[in-house]
Image: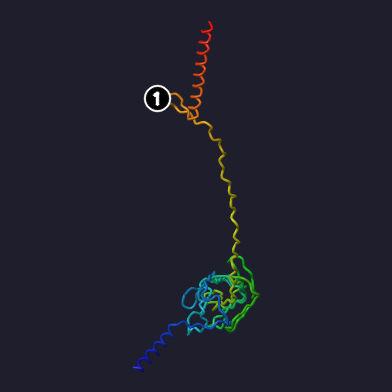
Amino acid sequence: MKKLLTAALSILLILTACAAPAFAETALDRENLALEGDVEADNSFENNEWFSAAFLTDGVHVALDEDPHAGWSIDPYSVIPQDEPINITVDLGKKYMLDTVVLRPCIYDNGLGMPRCFEVQISEDNTNWTSVAKVEALVVTEAVDQIYAFDPAPGRYVRIAITEHSDKVDNTGCYLSQISEIEVYGEKIPATPTPTAEPTAELTEEPTAEPTAEPTAAPTEEPAHKNGNTGEDVKGNDGKTAAIIIGAVAAAAVIAAVVIVLVKKRKK
């Protein structure tokens, strides 16, 4: 039983090793920010076996018998002259403080296809570019990493602006440029905390005093009301008392007048 398990594990390890891509070590002992980054090239031989623009950032930098991904190449069927400008642009996905770009020559031909003249440029917006290295008359005879270090600067995009291709000419008559890997190094930019706005005091309206009712004088006399039978105005208790007094005074006056008349008659 143990022999069967051991044999099965051995087969599994062999299959895993064969299936896994052969990734090489990075040029520097740091994180390669360009790994699996999006690449655009003005001219690219896309046969998807040995050459493709995407192979510039796939992390493969080994001999062809280990992995066929050699890197990027000018399309030999485009038959371009040696001085035709070609740009290769790598998108890192976000902004970093960049300080080093490494170009790794193709191993299979000892780097003979490396371009002769080019600039290494960086950009934050893929529109405005800053040159951080300028190379002229480069001749490579061994696949030695070309390391370009510069003062840290912010950037998200890295461009290799080729102005002269290698002396290597394809049998089609096309001048070639070929690069195995583009590696980019730098540091993450720390996020700046968003300032919190101080709370502003809300304006509150001053309370308005409620209007106070002006005191009204109490009525000194009850209002008159209609008598239900006669329709005449009838006053309250004070009115009744005054009417009685007036009636008594009037009766007294009548009586006094009668008495005076009787006295006068007796004198006659």
Residue most toward the right?
151
The mark tally for this picture is 1
Vertical relation: 23 (above or below) 257: below
Type of the residue with mark 1: Asn
The residue drawn where x is 56% and y is 42% is: 212
Residue behind mark 1: 229
Which quarter of the image is occupied by the N terminus? bottom left
Task: Point out residue 13 in the picture as x, y percentages from the top left corner.
Answer: 42, 87
Relative depth, front residue between 189 and 34: 189
Q: Residue at x 52, y 78 (%)?
A: 71
Q: Residues within 10 Å of mark 1 (few under 14, many from 20)?
A: few
| Residue 171 at x, y percent in the picture | 52, 77
User: What residue lies at 63% left-to-right and 77% top-to-bottom?
Assistant: 149
Q: Considering depth in this image, is 223 or 141 the residue closer to the camera?
A: 223
- Up the image or down, 254 lies above or below 10; here it is above
Q: Residue furthest top?
A: 268
